Amino acid sequence: MDKRSLIIPLMAVTLVAPAMRAWASTQASSPPPEMPGPVPSGSPKFIPEQGTAPALLGPYDGQGQRPGTLLLQGSNADQSAGQVARAEHQRVQVGTYSAFGPRDVQIWQASTQAFVHRGDVIFHSAKLLGGTVGVSCDMCHPDAANTHPETYPKYQVQLGRVALLRDMINWCIENPVRGKPFRDDDVRLKALEAYILAQRKGVALNYGQH
Amino acid sequence: MPYRDLETRYTAEREAFFAGLGKLASLSRREFFRVAAASAAIAAAKGLFTPHGFQLIEVAEAAPMGVQPFTFAYLSDAHIYTRELNDRFVRSLIKAVDDINALSPQPDFVLFGGDLAQLGAPGELDLGAEILKEIKAPVKMMVGEHDWFFDLGEHWQGRFGSPHYSFDHKGVHFVTIMSVYEKDFWTARGLSPAERMLTVAGLDNGVQSRFEVGEAGRAWLEADLARIDSHTPVVVFSHSPLYKYYEPWNFWTDDAEQVQAILARFDHVTVIHGHTHQLLTNRIGNIHFHGMLSTAWPWPYAPEGLPKLTVEMNRADPFDNFDGCGDGRFDVLAAGMLDSVYNLWNRNPVTVKASYLASGGRKDRPDATKVVAY
């Protein structure tokens, strides 16, 4: 193999490695940002709450467990000897999907928030919506009020058919905002949906509500 | 109050009646009829049972003398762009002007509730002034934040004069105050006039300061009201609500309590405000608050802080660009209180009577929509 083809990747690694090390050292084991996390559906709580590091994860808890195994531990410090002995016998096979730690959660939440923020910016800008009459969504929906995304899908009487939230977003862009409706795979449409849904966190889903 | 049985109470009332009759005996016949009519009107406005003859004397004594019933109309929050950009709000404003010109009988005057322009541009304000010139009755102007924060009121004041003034009309004292001043938030951020205006135009960004009347405004108001007798009905025109409804959307006046304190000594105060673009009713102490409709678009109700007395209008149909908008009028009663009539476009009109507010919501509740608001 030609040694020259290794030069650039090696240079890249040498340049980036100190930066990565520096970044890693600044990462205290702090709790994830205050952004609300998804609500667990009843499965074991892998997502840290209130700043407590998860007590379940093998590869990241610095206890030298082999990757691929999970040691179930009680979070209570004073355990009886019998409990500890029982816990040690419960080894559960865990794959990559659930092998994540606080840093991963931070990255995912930051990415989600950035996408929601992108929708926020578009929501408040007639130009970015492609509107031609100086009307933006927040002129009728401050803080995405009165969008009630939890009621979709529903029969939208005025359209004469069942609609999803994205259909109403596109209808508004076409009519009061007087712009060209977005295609289904347009990232701007998705960002707007993300922003609207993010404003209704915790509101019970109630599709079909008129 | 010690318990008194039915007979004792009736006897006491008869004594009071005959004592009061002495005062009435000194009136001429015409004056007597005027007092009687005024008393009956006041009793009706206050929602008291009538005719309960013995009570009319007490009520008559508290009657503000010299208030002749009359009507004035309003249109508010036009938010117009220039026609080349967007003629939708212009058409709505023209529709409201036509409504008011078609009123029969004509109102005594017409209030414009503020926010004539959307982005405070001279072109928008001039276009708005041209359209408002078509109104046959005299127009009283009020300034809103959308008119002000592009050039800090320069063009608006050049066209329409001072943002606060007062006048008396048929026994009622009217005062218009500038209530959308904001503490400087733009210099530190280095915003241009256009950016400042865009920031103020956004309801839900937390960047702009909350509205206030300000120290100078309150001093002016106090000086103006100093010469007014406390029995004279006072009507205040203000763009911001003069109470605290919902801070994140600036449905709010920072110094509301201080302004209310200045108004507290009067028997009958009605505050008529714009900015909220919705059916809104409130009462704090003796002050009645009525929000005006917008001709341009309706705001949804805020998630919290809605006054208890408000009977909500249902959310607007987005497929009808006039729904939830409109204009209206106020009927000034002999009692010195006001009935508010909302002329909602494409909906039945809604009347919020003075007796509804005076009785704390127990009588004459305005019509409500059957549909649940959510």
Image (spheres, rainbow, N blue to C red):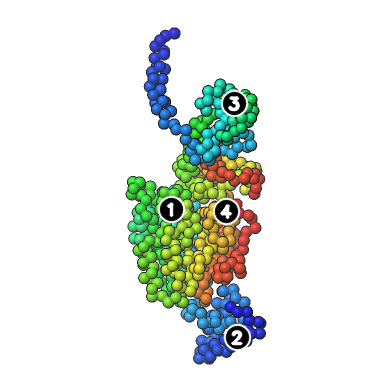
Q: Do residues under tags 2 and 1 come within 8 Å of each other at their CB atoms?
A: no
Q: Nearer the viewer, residue B211 or A30?
A: A30
Chain label for disc 3: A
Q: Residue at x 52, y 36 (%)?
A: A52
The residue where tag 2 is placed is: B12
What mark, if any, has residue B316 been given in the picture? 4
Element marked by disc 3: strand
| Amino acid beneath label 4 | Ala
Q: Nearer the viewer, residue B121 or B28?
A: B28
Element marked by disc 1: loop
The residue where tag 3 is placed is: A70
Q: Residue furthest top?
A: A1
Chain label for disc 2: B
3D distance between C-alphas at marks 4 and 1 = 21 Å
What mark, if any, has residue B118 been given in the picture? 1
Mark in the foreground, 2 or 1: 2
Element marked by disc 2: helix
Mark in the foreground, 3 or 4: 3
Q: Residue at x 64, y 85 (%)?
A: B8
What mark, if any, has residue B100 been given in the picture? none
| Amino acid beneath label 2 | Ala
Mark in the foreground, 3 or 1: 3
Chain label for disc 4: B
Q: Residue at x 55, y 70 (%)?
A: B358
3D distance between C-alphas at marks 4 and 2 = 54 Å
Q: Nearer the viewer, residue B317 or B203?
A: B203
Image height of A101 relative to B135, above or below: above
Q: Do residues under tags 4 and 2 come within 8 Å of each other at their CB atoms?
A: no
Residue B113 placed where, x, y %?
45, 62
- N-terminal of the two: label 4 or label 2? 2
Q: Residue furthest front?
A: A81
